[in-house]
Image: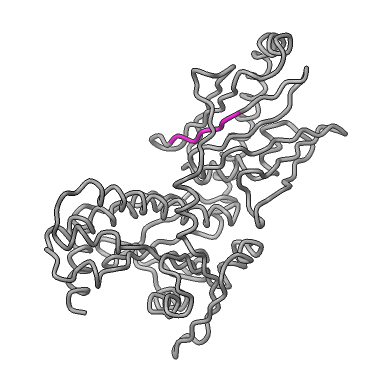
Amino acid sequence: MAERGYLVIADITGYTAFLSGSELDHAEDSLKDLIGLLIDQTKSPLVISRLEGDAVISYAPEASFLQGQTMVEIIETTYVEFRAARQRMRLNTTCTCNACQNIPNLDLKFFVHHGTYVLQNMANYTELVGNDVNVAHRLLKNRIKEETGIMAYAAFTETAVDALGIHEFVEEMQEHIEEFPDVGEVKLYVENLEPIWQRESKRRRVFVKPDEALYVTETEIPAEPPLVWDYFTKPEYRMVLAGSDSMEITDKNVGRMDEGAVYVCAHGDAETLQVVLDWRPFEYYTYEMPAPAGLTITITTRFIPIEGGTRVLEICAKPQGSIVARNVAKLGSGKFKAESQRGAHALREIIMKELDSGKTVRPEASSVSPDEVSEAAQASLAEAGAD
């Protein structure tokens, strides 16, 4: 039966330089490590269909994303991890062979399309078939690098942008057109991933440690971190956490949540501003907000993967303010903790109901064996060597 959803291809590039006179054993080891990283980073709701040489093919049902920004952040966090791994591999080797010396020439590109596909169960993997699947694969051969000069990128088709609702995001992306005889014209929006790496590698982390906390709450939810993150950050669900009458977001960064964005939490006529200090998708976010008696409190919400789901920790720092105000907060910490726990439990119940009803989809976890990774690496190296 045909389904609608997102088709994603993550493709490692740079083999011409990587294989030029290099030792294939070292090349294969490095490639297996990087393919393994892509597999680990292809997080639910993305489901791996199969490996195709140096590319990881995945998909996500339409109802598995609450916010389009989450798809963008899965790609960006994957690229940051790829660059960090590439950097470690280069720094940790003393080998002078061309394979090891050319590791910095490897890079990554992504293609995101939205459309219809059919799942066919094969012997060792799930095959995606359909016209939209063909479109996604055609994009692997493109003129993006030649026409834009961008080496590492995420290319979103216009249909993907519409489905994800990320029209404001593409203001900072570069428009690009590809045309294929059997597909026709495909409009793309290309995000340069190099600035993402540069920003993330320098960005300061702001988080509250449990041993610095006024209180810590803990809630286990049977869904993977990206989906739980979606619920905890989307305003209409975040209202449940705060027990508020309404919530909206101001000061977005080109249409997206990031550092400096503000959740405006309304209780009747009173508004409380929750200012985001640090935004690390699927790992944690930190914000500060005013509290009674002239206090300012800082809260970190962490998302920890566990078997079968996610453990969510809300870690509230000891407040800043006068000694009197701090003593008031200490006396009221039990109440604050109870309210926080009630909000998290109430949201957990909503998540469970929406998963049970099918309003939100939790795809099955992907599984790729080490043998499949080895076969993919060998096939990719053979193809690149033939070129």
Residue sticking out furthest to the right: 269
Residue at horizontal 75 percent and vertical 41 percent from the top: 247
Q: Is residue 270 left or right of residue 329?
A: right
Q: Which quadrant holds residue 104?
A: bottom left
**Nearer-the-camera pick, 286 or 116:** 286
Q: Which quadrant holds residue 304?
A: top left
- What is the magenta segment's predominant secondary structure? strand
- Residue 301 in magenta? yes
Residue 245, image x, y percentages? 79, 36
Residue at horizontal 38 percent and vertical 75 percent from the top: 140
Q: Is residue 272 left or right of residue 69?
A: right
Q: Which quadrant holds residue 170?
A: bottom right
Q: In this view, does 298 lie to the left or right of 190?
A: right
Residue 259, image x, y percentages? 61, 44
**Nearer-the-camera pick, 178 or 66:** 178
Task: Tell me where the magenta segment starts and ends, as one range.
Answer: 299-304
126 vs 365: above or below: below
185 vs 361: above or below: below
227 vs 243: above or below: below
